[in-house]
Amino acid sequence: MVNRQLINPESIVVVGASNNIRKPGGKLFHNILHGSFGGELYAVNPGEDTIQGRPSFREIKDLPATELAILAIPAVFCAGAVKELARDKGTRAFIIVSAGFGEESSEGKKIESELVEICNRYNASLIGPNCIGVMTPFYQGVFTLPIPKLDPKGCDFISGSGATAVFIMEAGLQKGLKFNMIFSVGNSAQLGVEDVLQYLDETFTEESSRVKILYFESIKDPDRLLRHATNLIRKGCRIAAIKAGTSDAGSRAATSHTGAMASSDLAVDALFRKAGIIRCYGREELTTVASVLSYPKAKGRNFAIITHAGGPAVMLTDTLAEGNLHVPQIKGKKAAELLSHLFPGSSVSNPIDLLATGNAEQLGIAMEYCEKYFGEIDGIIVIFGTPGLFPVYDVYDVLDRKMKQCKKPVFPILPSVTTAAGEIKEFQSKGHINFPDEVLFGRALNKVYNTPKPAGDKVYLDGINLKKVRAVIDSAPDGYLDVESVCAILDAAGISRVREEVATDPDALKKIAAKFGYPVVLKVVGPVHKSDVGGVLVNIRDEETLMTGFQQMKGIEGYQGVLIQQMLEGTELFIGANYEPGFGHVVLCGLGGIYVEALKDVTSGLAPLSVTEAGKMIRSLKSARILDGTRGKEGVNKDLFAEALVRISSLLRYATEIVEMDLNPLIGRPEAVTVVDARIRVEKKKKKAL
Ligand code: ADP
Ligand code: MG
């Protein structure tokens, strides 16, 4: 648990402090000494009596009581130091920046476990090992640069990697992004990203910072992440995060880096979406999104672009269109009036183009019209650089003044980062952000606007017979469920399935076919992948073909009988689910048949799904339009498809022993969505969640 001693300690000791500020212990001491810390600062170094002009202690035993200890000593000495500090000096928070633990060797891993054990025994917080440290408004306990000027309105940043934390800060500071607290959790031996987020959730007040950015190499406690991210977002926060290690090779890199297991990427995607976390993939993207998030949200999706150059405005308009954000035409009396203030050849229809000759005054007027008279505009984007003929201090002064007056958010895109470096620096020193690239900015804006709100975790149980589901699961052995059990589960969950019966003799078979009416489908019972062994015959139109088919089925290896089904016409759909340890079930949907296998056009969500989530999963399929019907083929009832997804996801929540479920295909028509093939695999001695 994160405690007060870690965030706002009255006293700090740097164990391994040094006079050499090129060493981590030296730099750490230096950073704290020259930072905002107002309490008692101590140093421990066996060979020195003074460190950086301050008295230093040769041994821990000589120290007075100290609340927070930061250790920059070799791994082998850490456990002894932590024990002595916790036992004798009342220390209740530790930051261990040293490396050489679980990320390096099994002996290191052992020391790490010992550290956790000691800290837990004394109710102490432990950050690290193998990290750069922590910065709060009260102290800057890191051995690295940069050290941002901390601002209570800035973002809270939690990182699973020290070096990446440094680079992300660099990328953010370039833009003028502000930081409030920074935690580098390293190996997360005791406290990980999720724990710090929990702390931010539980201590959230009206004054708390509203933007959180996270960098994960592994998600150790997905449930906790989901819960606290959802809570924070509901309280008015916004969260953006990178989860590195999406590819197999990337996962290997992450594993060797922090000594942690990488979790499955699809599950991460689904979890982020459910929580309302904006997923990013790189430093530039993360810090651009965080910069957008530090603005209040515009009321709607309509933006005015005021520019003095055509190209970037066009690229930005294109980018915004991809995210369904609009640059609407501006017309009417006030538009004409604005035009009269600009040079001939300018345009006001949006983008508002002031031409290369446009000046500070015209920019101010254009911003005023967007703010006051163009009611359809929700936000203003200003693109203003310089070809270097004259300085643009006056332009950015106007921009600064108008930004302070405007109620609509104003996003500055100042691209001349070399030629107008001085002007941009001055502009940013007034507290503003600069987005140097319009397309990166546009994509970030799209992400912010298109990430859904937290979905909630209410389970839809209408017409689902959980008792029946549990009874089937409880009595089933491990492995694929038999046809009867699969049918019983689908029926209990209220999922419609095709009329079907199993038969083992020809007379029974003929009777069933006559009852169903031709055409029928014949399938072998026994083998798991029926088509692969010639075990599916569709469109059987008469008794004779039925009998030939039956003979064929009997010859298949593993034959136990045949399943006879009504033949359905419609669009083939797919619903699948996998159990991801720690995450729960990831539910997938898509079009069936070749669309699943060849095009991999599937979307995912985390069980349990709400009707809204399921609807979104269906609409975000690339092949979604096929569901509306094409070239005379009838469409699919999407509401029923969504309902099937929701029902499946609900039943899975109560049957975590189901490790795999595959409904492929369901046949979708306007009046029904019907399962014609289902496989369910159960594993009761599941591996413990990661
Ligand atoms: P498997 O997945 O084991 O190969 P399926 O039962 O999914 O077997 O059948 C293979 C294909 O046969 C389906 O993708 C579908 O095209 C078709 N099919 C199966 N059952 C029916 C049915 N009742 N009505 C219409 N087509 C069907
Ligand atoms: Mg199938």
Image (cartoon, helix red, strand yellow):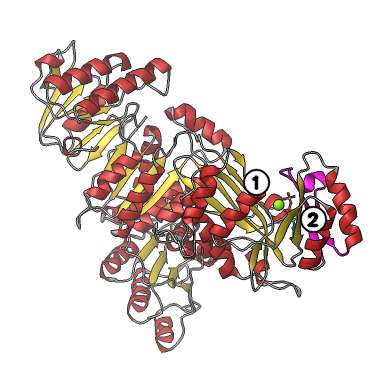
Q: Residue at coordinates 34% horizontally, 67% vertically from top-left?
A: 409
* Residue 474 seen in the current view: yes
Disc 1 element: loop
Residue 621 vs 118, above or below: the answer is below
Q: Nearer the viewer, residue 531 or 205?
A: 531
Mark 1–mark 2 distance (CA, rounded to whole Å): 17 Å
Q: Is residue 540 left or right of residue 321?
A: right
Q: Quadrant of residue 675?
A: bottom right
Q: Nearer the viewer, residue 311 or 419?
A: 311
Tell me the amino acid under the disc marked 2: Leu
The residue wearing badge 1 is 482
Residue 436, x across and y down, in percent: 43, 54
Residue 471, x across and y down, in percent: 51, 49
Q: Which mark is residue 662?
A: none
Residue furthest top as drawn: 47
* Residue 437 seen in the current view: no
Tell me the amino acid under the disc marked 1: Asp
Location of ligand 1 given as a quarter of the image: bottom right
Cβ(mark 1) to ligand 1 < 8 Å? no
Q: Nearer the viewer, residue 87 or 48?
A: 87
Q: Is residue 268 magenta?
A: no
Residue 687 vs 334, above or below: the answer is above
Q: Nearer the viewer, residue 246 or 684?
A: 684
User: Split into 4 quadrants, where in the image is the N terminus?
Assistant: top left
The residue wearing badge 2 is 522
Disc 2 element: strand
Q: Residue at coordinates 70% horizontally, 65% vertically from top-left?
A: 571
Cβ(mark 2) to ligand 1 < 8 Å? no
Residue span colored magenta? 519-542
